[in-house]
Image: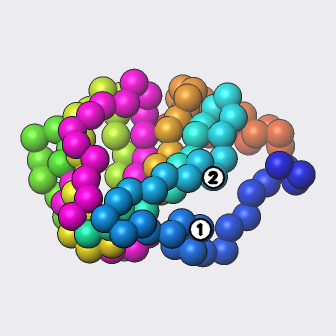
């Protein structure tokens, strides 16, 4: 990365949804975070699995059936999910879906920015 930031104007345009498949594209990765953009065609799924670290999901486009532990949810554009480590989850695309996954590789309990501002989670 040439700049100290990554700026993308339209996430939905960053991944081409494959016919009858799933495509994942790593947008950014460092020692603290991994950001992956997924494109799912209708009917495609990620079967139940877990992540060893906290994860965020943001649904950019489409509709999906999302299982979080024993709960079933419908994800639509704008849906945002925080998952604790080791939470069983799965995704089934009901329409073509674009989903952003953020894996957090550090504790976000307390951090200090360069300006000295302290941020604590609740």
Q: Residues within 10 Å of mark 2 (few under 14, many from 20)?
A: some
Up the image or down, 80 lies above or below 77; here it is: above
Q: Residue at x 60, y 37 (%)?
A: 33
Q: Magenta residues?
A: 43-66
Residue, far front? 19
> Which of the numbered marks, if any, corresponds to residue 30?
none
Q: Is residue 107 magenta?
A: no
65 vs 6, left or right, is left
Q: Nearer the viewer, residue 92 or 75?
A: 92
Q: CA distance from mark 2 to mark 1?
A: 9 Å
Query: Could you classify mark 1 by the number of other residues whose Cα lies within 10 Å: few (under 14), some (14-19), or many (20 or more)?
Result: some
Q: Is residue 63 left or right of residue 56?
A: left
Residue 107: horizontal and vertical position, in percent?
54, 26
Q: Which mark is residue 27?
A: 2
Q: Quadrant of residue 73?
A: bottom left
Instruction: Give SS at disc 2.
Output: strand
Magenta residue check for 63: yes
State the image coordinates of residue 103 (x, y, percent, origin top left): 50, 38
55 lies above or below 62: above
Q: Are marks 2 and 1 in contact (CB under 8 Å)?
A: yes
Q: Position of residue 5 (x, y in %)?
A: 79, 54
Which image quarter: residue 66? bottom left
Mark 2 vs 1, N-terminal side: 1
Work out which quarter of the rendered image holds the C terminus and state it.
Answer: top left
Tell me: residue 61, above or below residue 65: below
In the image, residue 117 sits, relative to residue 95, either above or below, namely above
Q: Which residue is mark 1?
A: 14
């Amino acid at each position: 990365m040439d700049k100290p930031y990554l700026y993308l104007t339209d996430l939905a345009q960053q991944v081409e949804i494959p016919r009858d498949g799933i495509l994942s594209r790593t947008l950014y990765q460092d020692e603290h975070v991994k950001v992956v953009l997924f494109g799912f065609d209708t009917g495609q799924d990620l079967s139940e699995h877990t992540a060893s670290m906290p994860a965020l999901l943001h649904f950019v486009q489409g509709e999906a059936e999302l299982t979080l532990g024993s709960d079933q949810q419908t994800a639509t554009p704008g849906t945002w999910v925080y998952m604790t480590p080791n939470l069983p989850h799965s995704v089934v695309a009901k329409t073509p879906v674009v989903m952003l996954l953020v894996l957090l590789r550090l504790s976000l309990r307390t951090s200090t920015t360069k300006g000295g501002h302290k941020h604590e989670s609740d």
